Image (tube, rainbow, N blue to C red):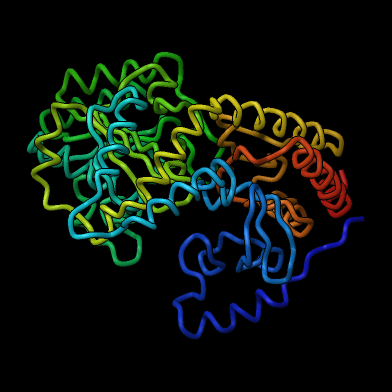
Amino acid sequence: MMELNTYTKSREAFERAVKVIPSGVYGHQGPGEGCFIPVEAYPFFSSKAQGTYFWDLDGNRFIDYMCAYGPNVLGYNDPDVDDAAKEQLAVENCVTAPSTVMIDFAELLVDTVASADWAFFAKNGNDVTTCAVLTARAYTQKKKIVFFNGYYHGISPWTQKVDYSGITEEDVCNNLYVDWNDYDALEEVFHQHKDEIAALIAQPYMHGNFRDNELPAEGYWQKVRKLCTDNGVILIIDDVRAGFRLDTAGSDHYFGFEADLICFCKALANGYNVSALCGKNFLKNAVSGLAYTGSYWMSAVPFAAGIACISKMKKLNLPHLLIEKGKKLEDGLIAKAQKYGFDLHVSGIPSLFYLRIADDPSFVWHQEWVAECVKRGVYFTNHHNHFMNASLSDSDIAYTLDVADEAFKVLRDKHPA
C-alpha cells in the first residue's frame, strides 16, 4: 500500500485563515462550499508548483488534474511564458496609457480564433461573459437571454438563480431555460418569445458539474446557428473553460460553426490574469459603446504572457496533444475500474474530461474513490470536469493509473460486490 498524505500544516494555516478571510478559502477552491468531500482527504494550501505538479504545505506532491481549474495549460512556471512576462515587466505593466503589446495580443487572437474580428480584454471569465451579454442587449435592444440547463457562466447576478443567496427576482427575470440538445424545445422558446431574445449563451458542449458531460448531437450547432441568425439573436459561446483545449481556433470552430461572440480566459495566458471577448465586426460598435472597464484590464504583463502562451500552443498543436494524453488516461482509468467491477463513466472531450462512478447514484462511492486518489498524490475532484496540460508525462499517467488501481481496490474492499 502507498503511504497516505497527512495535512497538519494545511489545517494550521486554515485555522489562521478563517479568522481573517471569509470561509478561510472562499469560493469553489475552499472547503466551505462543499466541493471537497470528504474534507479530510484534501490539502487547503499549496507551497509551490512546477510543470504538472503542485506541493502542499506538508510537502505532499500532487499530479494536478485540476490545473488551477484550467489556467495551467502548458505547465506551471512555463519558461517561455514566464520569460515573456518578466521581459515585459522590466519595461512597463500597469500604466496610464496602455502598452502597444495590447495591440499585438489582439492581432494574434484575431489571427488565431476563426470567428474573431476584434478582441476586448478584461481579467476574469465572468468579466467577458457579462460583457458579451451587455453587448448583445446593446446591439439588439432586447432583454431576454437563453441558457441551457446545467450551465455555468460566471458569478454575476444574471448568471445565477432566484433561490441563490443575495439574488432577487429582478436579477434573473429575463432568463429563459431549455435542455441541452433538445432542438425542438429551443425552437419553441424562440417562437414563444419572438422579438424578445437578445442572445443565446452556451458552452461549446455541456460540461456542467455533478453530471456527465454531453457533446452536441450531430448537426445540432448548425441548426442553432441558423435559428439565431434567422431570429436576430446573438450567439455567444462561453469558451472560458474549454477554450484552446479543443481547438486553437476556438471551440466553435472545433464543432463546425461560428459564434457571434466568444469568451476566453483560463488557458489564455497559462495562469496570468487576462480574459478576452472576441467577436464579429458588426458588434464592434456595440462593444465600444459600453461603460465597461477595470483598473488593471490593460496591464501589459498578462498580454505578453498571453502572446507567448498562444504562440506556444499553436507550435505544439496543443489540442491534439492534450486530447491524445487524455485518451490514454481515460482508457487506463476505465480498465482499472473494470478490473474491480466498477462502471466508471468518462465523458466529454479527453482534454477536458469528467469522471463518475455510475454504480452508486448518490456519488458517495465516487467521492470515496477520489479521496483515496488524492490521499495518494493524484489530485482529482468529485464534482467538476478535469483538465489536461502539456507537462503531463507518460510516467505521470502510469503513476496515476497505479494510484487509481489501489484506490479502486480500497473502494471494493469497503463495498464488496
Q: Residue at x 29, y 28 (%)?
A: 110
Quadrant of the drawing holding the N terminus = bottom right
Q: Say if residue 369 shows up in the picture.
A: yes
* Residue 351, quarter of picture: top right
Q: Work out whether 22 lies above or below 210.
A: below
Q: Work out whether 170 lies above or below 240.
A: below
Position in image of residue 378 (x %, y %) = 72, 51
Q: Residue at x 13, y 27 (%)?
A: 282
Q: Say if residue 362 shows up in the picture.
A: no
Horizontal arrangement in the rendering, residue 153 relative to residue 378 (left or right): left
Position in image of residue 16 (x %, y %) = 56, 84
Q: How many marks do you count on the picture?
A: 0
Q: Residue at x 38, y 45 (%)?
A: 304
Looking at the image, which is closer to me, 2 or 345? 2
Horizontal arrangement in the rendering, residue 237 relative to residue 72 (left or right): left
Q: Work out whether 46 lies above or below 119.
A: below
Q: Residue at x 77, y 70 (%)?
A: 6
Quadrant of the drawing holding the C terminus = top right
Position in image of residue 363 (x %, y %) = 65, 50
Residue extending farthest right: 1
Horizontal arrangement in the rendering, residue 252 relative to residue 267 (left or right): left
Looking at the image, which is closer to me, 151 or 332? 332
Q: Work out whether 228 lies above or below 275.
A: above
Horizontal arrangement in the rendering, residue 324 relative to residue 396 (left or right): left
Position in image of residue 42 (x %, y %) = 67, 64
